[in-house]
Amino acid sequence: MKSELKDIEDKILYLLSASQGSPVDDIELIETLDASKITSSEIQTKVKIAETTEKIIDETRSQYIPVAINAQILFFCVADMGKIDPMYQYSLEWFIRIFMNSIAQAERAETLAERVVHINETFTYNLYINVCRSLFEKHKLLFGLLMTVRREMEKGNIDLSDWRWLIAGGTVVPEQLPNPDPSWISVRSWNEILTLPTLPSFKNFASHFKKYIHEFKYIFDSSEPQDIKLPGEWAALDDFQCTLVLKALRPDKVTNAMQNLVAQVLGQKFIEPQTTDLSDVFKESSTTTPLVFVLSTGTDPAGSLYSFAETLKFSKKLSAISLGQGQGPRAEMLMKLAMDKGGWCFFQNCHLAPSWMPTLERLVETIDSDFVHKDFRLWLTSMPSPNFPVYILQNSSKMTVEPPKGIKANMLRSYLSFNDKFFKQCPGKNRIFKHLLFSICLFHAVLLERRKFGALGFNIPYEFTDGDLRICIDQLNMFLQEYNEIPFKVLVYTAGHINYGGRVTDDWDRRCMMNILGDFYCAEVISSSFMYSESGVYRQLPAETELAGYLDYIKNLPINDKPEIFGLHDNANITFAQNETTALLGYLLELQPKSVSGKGMSREEVMEATAKTILEKCPKTIDLKMVCQKYPVLYEQSMNSVLAQEVIRYNRLLMVIHQSLKDLLKALKGLVVMSQKLEEMANSLFINLVPVMWSGKAYPSLKPLSAWVADLIQRMAFINKWVDNGIPSVFWISGFFFPQAFLTGTLQNYARQVAISIDTISFDFKITTADQAQIPPKVGCYIEGLFLEGARFNAITQFLWESVPKELYFSMPPIWLIPTSNRVEPLKGIYHCPVYKTLTRAGTLSTTGHSTNFVFTVELPSSKPERYWIKRGVALMCALDF
């Protein structure tokens, strides 16, 4: 209309310019002016109506802005999941398709505001279901929490500084206050409580803590602390802020609090288990949309796919091939044939053929739905692999396949593969076979589930498979028929050292596994009254029990396994829950954006403040020349060499710290170029992690940055005290960069003192008290700073003892290391306790057959058999993770 009005104006101007003589005499001009007046009036009216309509449309469209904001938040939540696992890739087209379907599915409403709410709710849940189908179980809560937190941040309900404290921890202690009750408030908890007042909402929290100490003790002792309101003025904190207090008091319950937060913001259905139905996934597929099974160790979806193909009458049209070396051309031929004939292609183990993946990507990209049979489908299986084509991942229907969790589920899977005929394959020994079969199946389930306790279960999480169990069952059947007596020695050796033991690379894990196996492969399990656990929940069944009886018993087992069946203390469940919390917060740290906007200090300001604080606190290097002059190399005193080596190592670390911090501060001001290393270091400072630049020159440590710096200061204080005051009366073994050198030096001093070979000398051990360790011993040395995990030491009985509930680590009293020549180890009354540098226990396998994390073995007095503490996972640590 506006263009029409302009045309009329242009015509009038043309006629006026072309008019000859008086304009009044120009009839065409007068008629045009009359017509334009009428047309202009009509157009003006229409333009006003159009402008009004446009304004109404804009107003209506602006009311849909919450839908756009919600979609934008969710898209970046989905996109960020690719940082967690390379298989979590999704395309924009896939995202838009779910969005459009959700708009169509959303419930209608009388008002636009209600309609917007319905669209957001429908789309959020549809996206959650579709994404969860392709996520491993451990990442589903992470995705729900990510959506929750980012939506709440957009609304301004979560403060950025609070969020950073939750996932990275506090770095600054505004005021040092004494622990009001060390009997239940651990060092870790009190340190976190002291850092909370840096947040605006927790300004006086640490100073007011003592005022409500009984109420906080009640929360600490509760089995469901996440459901209890905070006392006094702190009851006004919202649910998210309460999670921060919970992290300080009961970190094992943070995951539960996160679930509650997701349920409160998004709804209960977002934390309920999501099941994957093959038929639903198939409905979403097409000739150009492959179906991808993302595998985890010990899973094989082939059986489910064959059954599904049978249901759809496609079993004869299904062509399967396991990819590997040389299988690419054959797979390509099968795929082209299936596209022509309308068959299904099933390519297994794509991760084993990384070189053929580009070819597969090209084949999928060139599929034209107009020239391919409508029944053609491409099924793929792969372990998570960075080599898997991103194009296929983004344009496929993905589903994860995981093994069953829990002893009940594992036992059920094993026994569902048996039949009554299988029970009768050992004539004359069927009763023994059934008892030992049940025993080895339970042993297999215990090994698999023990891994969830982290290093407390096994130092390394070995990938035991159903194949290990099957070969043990075959050997059990074979050996029972070959031998007249039950060959327990042969059964234990083949199962423990070959079938399962072939995967075990750590000697301490092998010791643990063999002791567990000894409980399941022994003469006692042949009895129908044998109990595998103290409570009797896990027990042997009567000899006449048939398969149906075993299945009924297994189905009635508890869903959640108690630590007793693993030989662990109840505290192991707390360790497991804390490991889950640590993993969840670790994932959230990985997903932190590089740039953020919000209240409080900017990212660069936080980095600069942290760098300045560390630079002020960080100790100076020690004068090595002065140390070498004061403590020269002496034949009779090896500790001088140990000290010099420690000073060299610490100086190297301190120089890197000082120089890198100075460079970073210059880079933040723009005085020097911000290199990639400096940028990575700055990011680590922001999220309270030790920079890789430092950890590469440092000792093994799991501590966050703030605790790591405090620990470094303490270590340097120990070294400086040694330099200033001479050899200490008691050595803080945790303060050594390389403790093995110190231990060797102690043995060497004794060997040179008594003039015998060091190879004949080993340590005897005696637990002492802090008072006794004030004066250096004449022989050997005192060490302190070790923490006992899985047990505690009873100072009254002088034996290893059960842990106190909720006390995960016990600070050991000083230990006297007594060098002794040709020492004969006691055969009983002791526990050979491994000493590790960090809580992970695992490290690189060294030439000694031990992990590089392993230091040495300490003999601790015990009134219980050694196997009891072995199954408890008892070990000594030089340093904790806080």
Image (cartoon, rainbow, N blue to C red):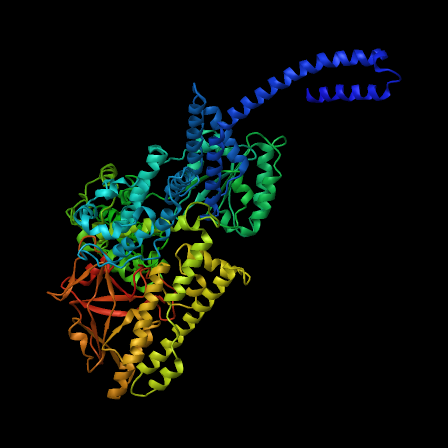
In terms of depth relative to the viewer, which is nearer, 367 or 414? 367
**x 51%, y 40%: residue:** 90
| Residue at 24% in and 53% down | 207
Q: Is residue 634 shown above or below 415? A: below
**Residue 123, x across and y down, in percent:** 45, 31
Task: Give the quarter of the image for residue 510.
Answer: bottom left
Q: Nearer the viewer, residue 153 or 761?
A: 153
817 relative to 196 in the view: left or right: left
Residue 660 higher or lower than 68, as above or below:
below
In the image: residue 47, left or right of residue 584: right
Q: Quadrant of the N terminus?
A: top right
**Visible in this render: residue 307?**
no
Place of residue 54 in the rendered image (x, y in percent of width and height, measured from the top left): 58, 23
Image spot of residue 842 (x, y percent): 35, 61
Can residue 775 be seen here? The reply is yes
Q: In the displayed structure, would residue 187 be above or below residue 373?
A: below
Please state which of residues 241 and 514 is positioned toward the viewer in this rendering: 241
Q: Is residue 444 above or below residue 731?
A: above
- Write down the quadrant of residue 420 in the picture: top left
Which quadrant would residue 115 be assigned to in this image? top left
With 393 as the anchor, is 792 left or right in this view? Answer: left
